[in-house]
Amino acid sequence: MAKPDNRNNNVERLEQMVNNTIENLEEAHKTLQNEDMKKEEREAIEAKNERREQSIDNFQAEIKDEMQARENGEV
């Protein structure tokens, strides 16, 4: 039998994921300051940063949904 879905800590977990992703994004921005970096490396980091920014947006939307679910007593 499957375990019931426990969503009690989803907001906190998602907030931690946002924070971790922001830290990675900031570290990548620092790495991009290196002028000796190869073009391919720079492009790969920039592409990854775009995905990180999209992930942050998605996490924040999910946090909003979870907060609304809590307010509505669904969690």
Image: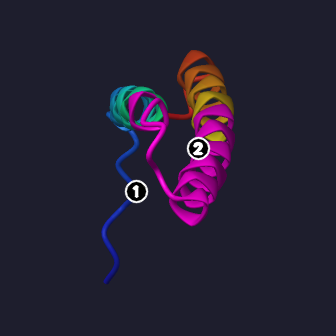
Using the image, determine if residue 65 lies above or below residue 41: above
Task: For mark 1, give the secondary structure.
Answer: loop
Work out which quarter of the rendered image holds the N terminus and state it: bottom left
Please identify the residue farthest to the bottom as the structure is shown.
Answer: 1
Q: Which mark is residue 49?
A: 2
**Helix, strand or loop at disc 2?**
helix
Q: Earlier in the sequence, mark 2 or mark 1?
A: 1
Cβ–Cβ below 8 Å for labels 2 and 1?
Answer: no
Question: Measured from the top left, where is residue 42 in percent x and y?
Answer: 56, 52
Q: Residue at x 36, y 61 (%)?
A: 4
Disc 2 to disc 1, C-alpha distance: 32 Å
**Above or below 54: residue 26:** above
- 61 drawn magenta: no
Amino acid at dot 1: Asp
The answer to which of 43 and 17 lies nearer the viewer is 43
Examine the residues drawn in magenta and state their main secondary structure: helix
Magenta stretch bounds: 30-57
Q: Name the residue at 46% across, 29% down.
A: 33
Residue 24 pos. (x, y %): 38, 37
Q: Is residue 7 above or below residue 3?
A: above
- Is 72 in front, or is 38? 38
Q: Quadrant of residue 58?
A: top right
- Which is nearer the eye, 2 or 35? 35
Direction front: furthest residue: 36
Nearer to us of marks 2 and 1 is: 2
Q: Could you tell me if residue 41 is visible in this image? A: yes
- In this rendering, the answer to whether 41 lies above or below 42 is below
Would residue 8 be seen by someone viewing this image from the given angle?
no
Dot 2 amino acid type: Asn
Q: Residue 65's spot in the image, x, y percent?
A: 66, 31
Q: Residues within 10 Å of mark 2 (few under 14, many from 20)?
A: some
Residue 5: give its label: 1
